[in-house]
């Protein structure tokens, strides 16, 4: 099934100048970028985006990390895009991420873990609407 998922290249990976290398992995796996922009999240944006984690002990650090520099937000489209993106990213904790995954290759810690990807169809729809409301998606 053709799906869409939200991907964020986080401030650590943007600072390392590896946006292109990460996008190349998505494209190499058959995912298409159908919307994208570089943006600086405000504290309110980051808190709203990660609201599901509000009660978690890592919430404060997560929010301050996500606003520490620009992020590259994009919608990826393709066959089984949600799971495909998660496989490409590897485990949340880069120490546990399989060799050859984005997090194994580019991430430094569980906070500075290079990328975010939607975890299920419902969250993908919500996360895409959060960053790309309206007509900014270009399927082809
Ligand atoms: P992400 O996929 O963006 O979703 C929430 C983020 O919280 C996660 O990636 C990690 O960067 C961060 N995080 C920090 N500590 C933890 C933890 N113990 N479990 C899950 N996520 C964590």
Image: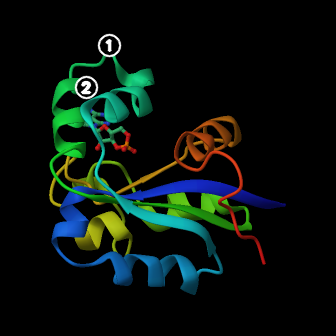
- Tell me if residue 92 comes above or below residue 10 in the rendering: above
Q: Quadrant of residue 63?
A: top left
Judging depth in this view, the residue of 110 and 34 nearest the camera is 34
In this orientation, does residue 107 appear?
no
Q: Whole-Å distance between the Cαs marked 1 and 2?
A: 7 Å
Badge 2 local density, few (<14 within 10 Å), some, or many (20+)? some
Instruction: For the N terminus, give its image quadrant.
Output: bottom right
Where ligand 1 lies, by image quadrant?
top left
- Tell me if residue 112 comes above or below residue 45 in the rendering: below
Q: Which residue is mark 2?
A: 59
Q: State whether label 2 is within 8 Å of ligand 1.
A: no
Q: State whether label 1 is within 8 Å of ligand 1.
A: no
Q: Which mark is residue 55?
A: 1
The answer to whether mark 1 and mark 2 are in CB contact below 8 A is yes
Q: From the viewer's perspective, tell me whether residue 24 is left or right of residue 13.
A: right
Badge 1 local density, few (<14 within 10 Å), some, or many (20+)? few
Q: From the viewer's perspective, tell me whether residue 94 is left or right of residue 32.
A: left
Judging depth in this view, the residue of 103 and 139 nearest the camera is 139
Farthest-out residue, right:
1
């Amino acid at each position: 099934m053709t799906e869409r998922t939200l991907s964020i290249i986080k401030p650590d990976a943007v600072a390392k100048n590896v946006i292109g290398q990460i996008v190349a992995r998505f494209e190499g796996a058959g995912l298409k970028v159908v919307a994208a922009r570089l943006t600086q999240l405000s504290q309110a944006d980051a808190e709203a985006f990660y609201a599901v984690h509000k009660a978690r002990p890592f919430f404060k650090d997560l929010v301050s990390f996500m606003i520490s520099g620009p992020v590259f937000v994009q919608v990826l489209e393709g066959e089984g895009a949600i799971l495909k993106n998660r496989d490409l990213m590897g485990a949340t904790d880069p120490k546990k991420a399989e060799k050859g995954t984005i997090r194994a290759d580019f991430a430094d810690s569980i906070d500075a873990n290079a990328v975010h990807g939607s975890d299920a169809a419902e969250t993908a729809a919500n996360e895409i609407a959060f960053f790309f409301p309206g007509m900014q998606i270009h399927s082809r």
